[in-house]
Amino acid sequence: LSAQAAAVMLMTSQRVGTVIVLRDITDDVRRERARDALLDKLSTDVQAPLEEFGRTALGERQPLSSFAREMTRHAVALQKLIVEMRELTANLDARGLEQRQRALPLDTLIWAVANEWRQVAQATNLTLQVTIARSGLYILGDERRLRWALGNLLDNAIKYTPPGGTLSLEVVGEKNGRAFLRVRDNGVGIARADLTQVFARFVRGNPITATGRAIHAPGTGQGLTIARQIFEAHGGSIKLKSKQFVGTAVYVALPLTSPVSMEMPKVYTPELMEGETVRLSVSK
């Protein structure tokens, strides 16, 4: 709790009491601790590729192409970490998103996300497929945050899918006023014991390949947490299914909206409220 005290004075400068205001700062403290943990993680992940470069320069027998792929992987991860750090301090509830929401063509949003991550997938020898089973849908939302949230799902699929694998970004269809999306991969999957914790902040599992090799992917373990907050702030939902050594599928539902918003014109004078009915202009 944060406490502030002030004296209550009369006009005659006589003190008659004291006012104490208590404020719950639990959320502020949690955000500050999360930010500190993220900065520590960011510092560690910045250092990792530099150390790798130093070892290569000293003559380790590692192909340059392999090192370049590893640098690309770290660079993308660091970019994502910086975005996550900014999102920690942002207002992710529906009220905070209202001013930045607009009608978004879902097809355009999907292709924009796919184009952002296609080269990253190709750099790790993965195939990214896009499937749009139902075109022409519109959702109401903050484009920047939705692109980040969907990109995070692709980022995870890329991290945990061995070279030669396939991942997909799909618009499955719509039902009851909601659009349904899916991100799938044929990667290493998630162990059953870790499935209950996938949306917990700063909790990371221990993914391994079918041969038992551990996968050490850069990250903070909070990407899915923030992605879920973004989808839920848009009135949507997210769920995940996975089978170890088979693959993972993430399902997202988002409310649909009309492609054109209708606004009533503003009326400034009382006399305009009288007389015959007139045709109103419509803002598109």
Image (cartoon, helix red, strand yellow):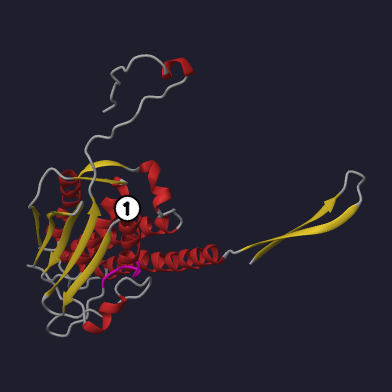
Quarter occupied by the C terminus = top left
Q: Pinpoint residue 218: horizontal percent, then vertical percent.
A: 29, 68
Q: Pinpoint residue 32: horizontal percent, then vertical percent.
A: 51, 64
Q: Pinpoint residue 130: horizontal percent, then vertical percent.
A: 9, 54
Quarter holding residue 12: top right
Is residue 186 left or right of 56 when viewed as pictured?
left
Is residue 256 left or right of 96 when viewed as pictured?
left
Please rate how many residues cluster around mark 1, counting C-alpha atoms within 10 Å: few if below 14, some from 14 to 19, many from 20.
Answer: many
Element class at badge 1? loop
Depth check: give the residue in front, 110 or 128. Answer: 110
Q: Main secondary structure of the magenta part?
A: loop
Which residue is denoted by mark 1 in the rendering?
234
Task: Indicate whether residue 218 is drawn in magenta.
Answer: yes
Task: Indicate whether residue 21 is drawn in magenta.
Answer: no
Relative to 1, say whether 197 is above or below. below
Quarter holding residue 154: bottom left
At 19% from the left edge and 81% from the top edge, which residue is drawn?
A: 208
At 37% from the left edge and 24% from the top edge, which residue is drawn?
A: 265
Depth check: give the residue in front, 98 or 67. Answer: 98
Quarter holding residue 16: bottom right
Quarter occupied by the N terminus = bottom right
Depth check: give the residue in front, 210 or 90. Answer: 90
The amino acid marked with disc number 1 is: His
Q: Is residue 78 visible?
A: no
Relative to 188, say whether 79 is above or below. above
Q: Is residue 279 visible?
A: yes
At 17% from the left edge and 57% from the top edge, which residue is drawn?
A: 181
Relative to 277, say whether 69 is above or below. below
Is residue 52 left or right of 36 when viewed as pictured?
left
Q: Which residues are magenta?
A: 217-222
